[in-house]
Amino acid sequence: MPGRLVEQLLDAGLITERQALASDPDDPLVPPSRVIQNLVAEGLDERTLAGHFVSLGFGPVLQGAELARADWELVRRLPATDAHDLCAMPLRPSPAGAIVAMADPTDERAVDVLRQWLGGAILPTVARLSDLLAAIDRAYPPDRPTLVSDPWALVGSRTPSGVVVSARQPLEPDTDQTLPDFDPALSELASTSSLVWDRAWNRSTTERDLPSIPSGGVPTPSAPVPATPTPAPSDAALEVELGELREASTRDDAVRIACRACLCFARGGAFLALRKGVFRGWDGIGEDVTTVGIRSLWIPASNPSILNDVLHSGEPFIGTYGDNAADHLFRSAFGNRGRQVAVAPVLIGTRVVGVLCADDPVTDAASIERVAQALAEALEGLIMSRKSRN
């Protein structure tokens, strides 16, 4: 199992051969979760790793606050030793099975063990490794050999543990490397878990009351910091950006300027290229937006989402973010603050080569349509120029 996982990550271009050799002891008894931790210690960006699993259908990526809301009755069923060994955190029951955050949701042996302890079906999902390890340490203190009767009573007194991530240089956006076709036998949930997960998560949070956390347990998360209001749109500033976009000399420059142009009418902007059936983040700009975060965004175009709707309709979208797994991942790349989003297809001829996205726009779809059209013309011009030189 660890060997197969490492091979898939290597084939996907997420790790180097050096990282693969340093992380995989070639021992079948070593659990994949341990190999995952070794890979992150060797420099694999944990956000990129989570995005890889989401592209297989496991998701959305859960945040630390969501891990802290775990059903402690479910937590008690899993022994502490197994929680640490499997790097798995039970979260809550659902009609489709127990939702469990795992370092490696494709680990079928770990899923079998979880099924035995938790009883019934298991619905694996993902979280950033550092958040997952911290949640497991809080629920199952490693210095206690047995599971405490109320694991949340110790939360307030423990400092969350984590791993120091040394992010490697992400793949260049114009590379031909992308996610390969994965073996459907990788997991029984690989091809359907996105829809199942969406239904299970939504029903588990809306149809049942979560148990109250005992006093001394998980602190109530503070209210989120209000998002900085989006400035009023500036037509003059947008015209300046469009003028620069027409003069862009490289694809990277064109994409960067297009994303920056979105700031004239939105909190943030990003471009996702469509390559081999996967929306891949290319670049982005704005509050709470980082290039690394955008480039770690890989969303299969076939997954139900706003991006999928825009791809098939060829029309721009403006409205609230969706509720599907891919939409949650998409929104997280913008910092999870915006309520509205605008998405416009970027077409060269009749072919959609990507989508331009604006977080919390303050105008109608016309603004992002103008930028998307200008970006398409700039990219097409660069392609023609390169062909003429050859």
Image (cartoon, helix red, strand yellow):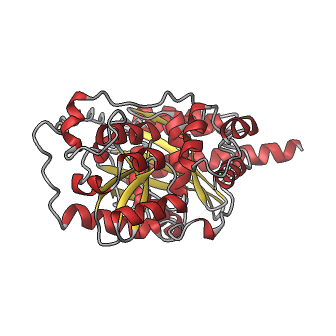
Please state the horizontal and vertical placement of residue 73, each as a whole percent of the image: 22, 56
Residue 366, visible in the rendered structure? no
Would residue 226 appear left or right of 310 to someone viewing this image? left
The quadrant the N terminus occupies is: bottom right
Q: In the current view of this chain or complex, which residue is farthest to the left?
A: 215
Q: Is residue 69 above or below residue 183?
A: above
Please state the horizontal and vertical placement of residue 113, each as a whole percent of the image: 45, 61
Residue 179, visible in the rendered structure? yes
Q: Nearer the viewer, residue 234 or 325?
A: 325
Q: In the current view of this chain or complex, which residue is farthest to the front?
A: 145
Q: Is residue 162 above or below residue 152?
A: above
Q: Which residue does the image show at 83% across and 47% down from the upper left?
A: 387
- Determine which quarter of the picture holds residue 332: top left
Would residue 242 appear left or right of 340 to someone viewing this image? right
Q: Nearer the viewer, residue 66 or 236?
A: 66
Please state the horizontal and vertical placement of residue 18, each as a whole percent of the image: 74, 35
The quadrant the C terminus occupies is: top right
Please state the horizontal and vertical placement of residue 247, each as a whole percent of the image: 64, 34
Q: Which residue does the image show at 26% across and 34% down from the upper left?
A: 229
Q: Nearer the viewer, residue 212 or 175?
A: 212
Q: Which residue does the image show at 60% across and 65% down from the upper left?
A: 186
Q: Nearer the viewer, residue 338 or 157?
A: 157
